[in-house]
Amino acid sequence: MDLVAASPAFVLAVVLIAASPGPAVALILRRAALRGFRGAVPTVLGLEVGLYVWALLAAAGFAALVAASEVAFLVLRVVGAAVLVWMGLQAWHAAWRARRSPIGAGAPAPPVGPDRRGRWTAFGEGLLVQLANPKAAVFLMAFYPQFVPTDRPLFATTAALALVQVAIETALYTGLAAAVARAGAWFRRPRVRSRLEAVSGTVLVGLGVRVAAADR
């Protein structure tokens, strides 16, 4: 397959992958709604760094080992499920706190500024969610070879394709974060925030359960 000829199909596939519901979208929506655009950007960057790491590991053959090894896949699956469930429980706890907030229902809480520690926490959250997803490893292992010509080096071409995917997803996810952040004041109203946190927690716990129950 010629790389240039395959580019439109690759870009379309990446856009569809990015738009599909999953832990990344749920995480970005929650961060942007409650922390604003600047609070969501480090999460997006963490997710994309994790994606690129998995892409390189897939090209190097590590993802094949994960797919072939029952133990490795089980460990990643358990870790990934635990991370998602833990984040979901945190969201439920935040929903409970917001419901008990003394601030009136009509007064939105001010956005929390993204200090240095907060930025690294958000970045680490995105990175951890991506790296703890064994399905990402298996999927990328099957995805990239479809677009790598037989006369091109697998690792270098996969690394280049992954950079394109990272660039596209970063643009899409930051655009999503910016759109959600515009309504941030409404999302930060105690009643709305409580419901958002409860829904986010339910989604994250559900995704964690799905990861735990997934097979290869």
Image: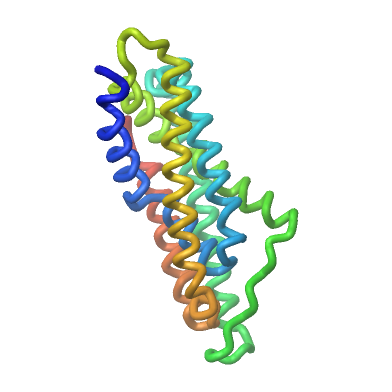
Which residue occupies the foreground of this view, 207 or 129?
129
Q: Position of residue 199 (x, y in %)?
A: 42, 68
Vertical relation: 46 (above or below) 28: above
Q: Residue at x 62, y 46 (%)?
A: 124
The image quadrant where one finds the C terminus is top left
Q: Position of residue 197 (x, y in %)?
A: 49, 69
From this viewpoint, is residue 147 visible? Answer: yes
Q: Position of residue 168 (x, y in %)?
A: 42, 42
Residue ranking furthest to the top: 151
Left or right placement of residue 74 versus residue 147 in this view: right
Vertical relation: 86 (above or below) 5: below
Q: Residue at x 45, y 57 (%)?
A: 175
The image quadrant where one finds the N terminus is top left
Q: Position of residue 9 (x, y in %)?
A: 25, 33
Left or right placement of residue 159 versus residue 2 in this view: right
Left or right placement of residue 24 versus residue 14 in this view: right
Q: Residue at x 45, y 75 (%)?
A: 195
Which residue occupies the foreground of this view, 97 or 164?
164
Q: Quadrant of residue 141?
A: top left
Residue ranking furthest to the front: 4
Vertical relation: 31 (above or below) 127: below
From this viewpoint, is residue 72 visible? Answer: no
